Image: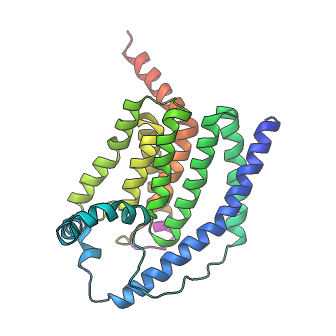
């Protein structure tokens, strides 16, 4: 490992360590908002428990009530997520543990070095470094709050739009397929089985699929499935959660996407070569 990899690792380590304080701010705001919401709306559970159907019911109700004004306001509301404007609450002060800071430094150093080794110092390297920072924030916010703020996912989508001209390594058709090939099946499954996936998870795969293309996002999803299954087994063995409790899937998806960015194409090519060799007489 050369000087470039070491410097890149050090920079990403610092960025992820600083991200821990941002995570604490976001998580503290969400937790305080949710507690106040539960207190104020304790008797109103329909929207919260209705899943997919209740979500779209609320969308059509707003369209009917506010008309053209809602069409203008909807993109802004979707980007920011539920802000709890009718609530009065004070964000919680979340402490940043030393263990999380150490973990951030170790992961940042390792991932920064691998990104520099994999891509060199070019436009794609900077895009993937920014993606890793966002994935780190998303993973821990979801782990802390069971929620992925929409603006974090849409920042990834905006990166995908910018990368069309700045990087240009992924064909546009692969981006379109990547945007839908995982997120749409997840959305359909969520409609069939309420709360099978969170909307934040679906939006994450939608945005990351457009940035990375279908090959990497499919590999990332498969990696995430295996990682999530492993974590779930470990958690259940340690009896920290019962079989009916929910476990955030976002962290597993984030790890899977990060691993796919580094090694997804290599795994796909290896698998394709293996299939080709078996089919060849």
The residue under the point 43% across, 34% down is 215
Vertical relation: 98 (above or below) 91: above
Q: Position of residue 242 (x, y in %)?
A: 40, 73
Nearest the viewer among 196 and 233 is 196
Q: Is residue 241 magenta?
A: yes
* Magenta segment: 235-242
Q: Position of residue 9 (x, y in %)?
A: 74, 46
The residue under the point 67% across, 53% down is 107
Vertical relation: 209 (above or below) 252: above
Q: Quick one: quadrant of the N terminus?
A: top right
Colouring chosen for the image of the structure: rainbow
Viewer can see residue 272: yes
Image-quadrant location for residue 192: bottom left
- 33 relative to 20 in the view: left or right: left
Vertical relation: 202 (above or below) 210: below
Q: Residue furthest top?
A: 281
Q: Quick one: quadrant of the C terminus?
A: top left
The residue under the point 67% across, 58% down is 16
Vertical relation: 121 (above or below) 188: above
């Amino acid at each position: 490992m050369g000087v470039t990899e070491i410097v890149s690792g050090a920079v990403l380590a610092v960025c992820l360590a600083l991200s821990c304080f941002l995570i604490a701010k976001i998580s503290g705001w969400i937790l305080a908002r949710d507690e106040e919401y539960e207190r104020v709306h304790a008797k109103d559970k329909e929207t919260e428990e209705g899943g997919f159907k209740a979500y779209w019911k609320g969308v059509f109700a707003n369209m009917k009530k506010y008309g053209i004004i809602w069409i203008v306001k909807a993109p802004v509301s979707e980007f920011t997520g539920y802000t709890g404007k009718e609530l009065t609450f004070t964000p919680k002060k979340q402490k940043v543990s030393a263990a999380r800071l150490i973990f951030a430094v170790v992961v940042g150093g390792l991932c920064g070095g691998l990104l520099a080794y994999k891509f060199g110092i070019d436009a794609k390297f900077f895009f993937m470094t920014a993606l890793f920072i966002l994935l780190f924030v998303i993973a821990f916010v979801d782990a802390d709050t069971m929620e992925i703020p929409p603006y974090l996912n849409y920042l990834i989508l905006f990166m995908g739009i910018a990368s069309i001209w700045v990087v240009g390594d992924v064909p546009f058709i692969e981006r379109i397929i990547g945007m839908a090939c995982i997120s749409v099946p997840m959305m359909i499954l969520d409609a069939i089985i309420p709360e099978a996936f969170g909307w934040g998870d679906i939006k994450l795969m939608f945005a990351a699929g457009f940035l990375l293309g279908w090959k990497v996002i499919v590999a990332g999803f498969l990696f995430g499935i295996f990682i999530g299954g492993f974590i779930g087994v470990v958690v259940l063995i340690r009896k920290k959660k019962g079989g009916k409790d929910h476990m955030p899937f976002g962290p597993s998806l984030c790890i899977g996407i990060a691993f796919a960015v580094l090694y997804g194409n290599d795994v796909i090519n290896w698998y394709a070569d293996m299939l080709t060799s078996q089919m060849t007489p």
